[in-house]
Amino acid sequence: MIDSCVATHHFDLAYTYFKEMKSHATIKPDLITYNTLIKGCALNNDSHTGLQLIDDIKQRPDLSMNAITYNTLIDLFVRVNNMDQAYNLLNDMNNTALKPDSFTYSTLMKGIKKNVKRLPKERTIEQCFG
């Protein structure tokens, strides 16, 4: 249901279903649900809700972010031109057992291309990609 709402650009409805899901003691959103909502945030350039979802995940001891979570979050922050946050997520990812993959790097390259005039001139490729 949440995925269908996100896919049809009804993010508000998806988030309403998510909040309803969280209010029930017997139904807990899983990581797939969170990843789907983060994708919705990216499609809607909603970094505020994306940050809230990160906090939700981190507060749940039964959940931990996977490569899809990181890649989707990086995409969100690239879309809203927040490359600092995208690089912070890359650094966080590098500090886990997860490793960046081709999706991670292609998303970051998209952000670099989109934000080339905003990037500090002293930032090297090594700094961009950890």
Image (spheres, rainbow, N blue to C red):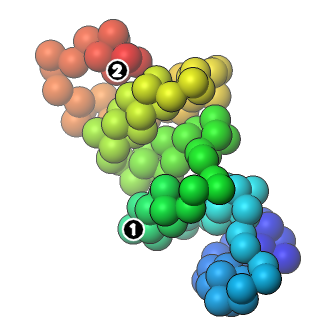
| 107 horizontally vs 63: left or right | left
Indicate whether 58 appears above or below 87.
below
Quarter the C terminus occupies: top left
Q: Position of residue 20 (x, y in %)?
A: 68, 89
Instruction: Estimate how packed mark 1 is, as few (under 14), some (14 to 19) or many (20 or more) residues with alpha carbons within 10 Å.
Output: few
Asked which quadrant contains residue 51, the reply is bottom left
Kindly tell me whether residue 113 is visible in this rendering.
Answer: no
Q: Residue at x 84, y 76 (%)?
A: 1
Residue contact at pointers 1 and 2, CB within 8 angstroms: no
Mark number, residue 70: none
Q: Relative to the observer, which residue lies in front, 117 or 38?
A: 38
Instruction: Estimate how packed mark 2 is, as few (under 14), some (14 to 19) or many (20 or more) residues with alpha carbons within 10 Å.
Output: some
Q: Relative to the observer, which residue lies in front, 78 or 55?
A: 55
Q: Residue at x 15, y 16 (%)?
A: 122
| 57 horizontally vs 84: left or right | right
Q: Give the residue at mark 2.
A: 128
Q: Position of residue 69 (x, y in %)?
A: 61, 46
Q: Amino acid at mark 1?
A: His
Q: Position of residue 91 (x, y in %)?
A: 38, 28
Kindly tell me whether residue 95 is visible in this rendering.
Answer: yes
Mark number, residue 48: 1
Q: Residue at x 40, y 18 (%)?
A: 129
Q: Could you say whether the residue bearing mark 2 is in a helix, strand or loop?
A: helix
Q: Residue at x 65, y 82 (%)?
A: 22
